[in-house]
Image (spheres, helix red, strand yellow):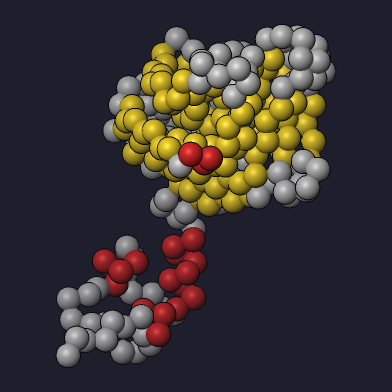
Amino acid sequence: MAKQKILYNEWKEDEPLPEGVSWQNVYGIGKPSNWADVTVNRLEKILYYLTYFHSLDGFIKLTSGTGAISMYSGGDAIQLETGDTSDSYANLRKDINYPPVQTTWDKNRMFHITVDLYLYDVNGCVGTGYTSGLGSWGNGGNFIGFRFTNKKLYARTQTNEANKTEVLLFDFSGESFPSKVFRLKMKFFAKERVEFFAEQVSVIKTMSCVITTNLPTGTANADTLLEFYIRNSVASNRLMSLSYFTLVQPG
């Protein structure tokens, strides 16, 4: 008969652990003085952020021209739009000023976001860190994420505007007005590689790639958890929306 697997949250501190199991390989720490310490020690090492965009509160919002940022009509997403004036933009950012742990590119990081991208005559980006010429800053910076321009979607890494790597994931050049819902995922392995995944929801098609060059290091811009930016190139309104975002920096 197979042995019943013991759940560690059911294990009492005064009882021995199962054979071959130690506190070190269960929790990455020595045996705690009490069970509350297990939770505290683990959480103190992890940066975790999750939002369903139910409010505009807590975000940095920058616009130019006729750009605007608002809640979607159903209240379950944030909408960015350029308005009808050419070369207008809308920029949404989430920074963390006093994180529970140090934000850094020297630790692994991952994010997952659901976004409705209206790819016709619009340029922009979505990711973690900030970009140059794409987002709100003009002096370059560390960034990992996705760029969209001219009906194409790219995976992108950069340490500044001069040092960047891009890989084409989707090309909708043959479509007149491509509007696509994507689930975008990124897994960053510090100083090694970034794995990108872009799933086009309507047709359940996923494209992926791995980038190993121009990977951010250090702490600069690591406190920008999210940047989402759109700019139009014609005198016509362009809309995009975000409905889910999560980011994790493991301990």
- Where's residue 25, x and y in %? 26, 66
1 or 118: nearer the viewer: 118
- Where's residue 36, x and y in %? 49, 75
Residue in the picture at 59% in, 13% down: 133
204 or 149: nearer the viewer: 204
- Where's residue 178, x and y in %? 59, 24
Residue in the picture at 49% in, 61% down: 43
**Which of the 4 image quadrants contains residue 150?**
top right
In the image, is 221 to the left or to the right of 232? left
- Where's residue 174, x and y in %? 51, 16
In the image, is 166 to the left or to the right of 127? left
**Which of the 4 image quadrants contains residue 121?**
top right
Residue in the picture at 22% in, 75% down: 21
The image shows a total of numbered marks equal to 0
Q: Classify 211 as above or below 26.
A: above
Q: Is residue 229 visible?
A: yes
Q: Classify 69 as above or below 58.
A: above
Q: Classify 96 as above or below 16.
A: above
119 or 128: nearer the viewer: 119
Q: Is residue 64 visible?
A: no
Residue in the picture at 47% in, 69% down: 39
In the image, is 128 to the left or to the right of 243? left
For the N terminus, the quadrant is: bottom left
241 or 96: nearer the viewer: 241
